[in-house]
Image (cartoon, rainbow, N blue to C red):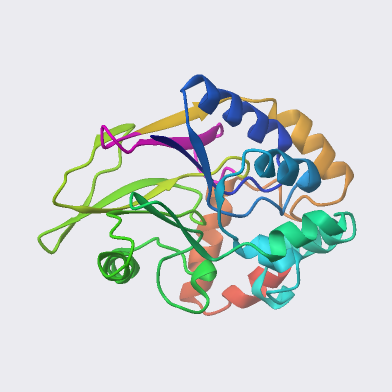
Amino acid sequence: MRLGLISDIHANLEALEAILADLDAAGVDRLVCLGDVVGYNTDAEACIALVRERQPVWVAGNHDRGVTGQLPESDFNSTAARALAWTRARLTAPALEALRTLPLKATAGSDLVAVHGALHPEVGCELVRLNNHERRRLSFAALQAHPSGARVCAHGHTHQIGVFEMRGGALLDRTADEVTLRDDAHYIISPGTVGEPRYAEQRATAMVFDTEKRTLVVRRAAYDRSRTWIKTRRAGLVPRYWFLPAGLRRAIRKTARAARIHSTLKRLGV
């Protein structure tokens, strides 16, 4: 079976349509959505409908739980909180209910465990960002003990493509556009982001996991980002400091953490 892995759509309809067309062309058998269908952009209702009609394996992201009120606005910066309030006022009751009933963890048979943030801990896993080896080791331990017997855990939330391998106690970064999985190893993987790029890659990204061939292939799809941007800006949802390059904003946040003023910048939406 070919599983199409997507995450962090963030109400970007143009990106979602492009990557779904690409996954269809790749012959995907089933979609796996790793959460955050909503947030930041304006087409949440349409994106929810597109994902739902695919009958995917689907888990909740932190923005999905924020828009339903299952997470408090204090868990989000000002830009994200503003988008969640805007979205909540416009989503239909069925769309909100679809998000509210999503699980935090799901499986695709014995092949894959799906989460948004991390496989650990039991509470608040959708908020954990797997961006260092210490956290990855904790999720690897949870994967190795998972009752499904799956050797692959797919997550979102980082907005970065990643493939990490655990074998014999050694944790290796195996990130590449094509990876063949070993039978004696466990893997934590991320397909990047469909609709909210934060690094050099600006296209919508996804992964295809061939469960029979034991291969991972990264997929990318270009789309008209200007259409999304115009709608988002007209709705008043762009970050206050949108004119600063993303790399500079990340550097400011890193410095702020060191100076222990990150919470202030978070409230300002930097």
Percent of width and height locating residue 152: 32, 52
Considering only vertical position in the picture, is 90 above or below 2?
below
Q: Decide whether residue 214 is among the magenta residues.
A: yes
Percent of width and height locating residue 167: 14, 56
Q: What residue is shown at x 47% (from left), y 23% (from top)? A: 27
Report whether 183 appears left or right of 37: left
Considering only vertical position in the picture, is 199 above or below 227?
below
Q: What residue is shown at x 13% (from left), y 64% (from top)? A: 169
Q: Decide whether residue 270 is among the magenta residues.
A: no
Considering only vertical position in the picture, is 168 above or below 46?
below
Of 38 and 176, the residue lying toward us: 38
**Which segment is the magenta one?**
197-216
Report whether 122 appears left or right of 99: left
- Residue extending furthest left? 168
Q: What residue is shown at x 89% (from left), y 42% (from top)? A: 234
* Quadrant, the N terminus: top left
| Residue 165 visible, this orientation | yes
Q: How many marks?
A: 0
Q: What residue is shown at x 65% (from left), y 69% (from top)? A: 266
- Residue extending furthest front? 109
Percent of width and height locating residue 112: 37, 51
| Residue 270 visible, this orientation | no
Percent of width and height locating residue 224: 70, 25
Report whether 190 appears left or right of 166: right
Report whether 155 appears left or right of 262: left
* Quadrant, the C terminus: bottom right
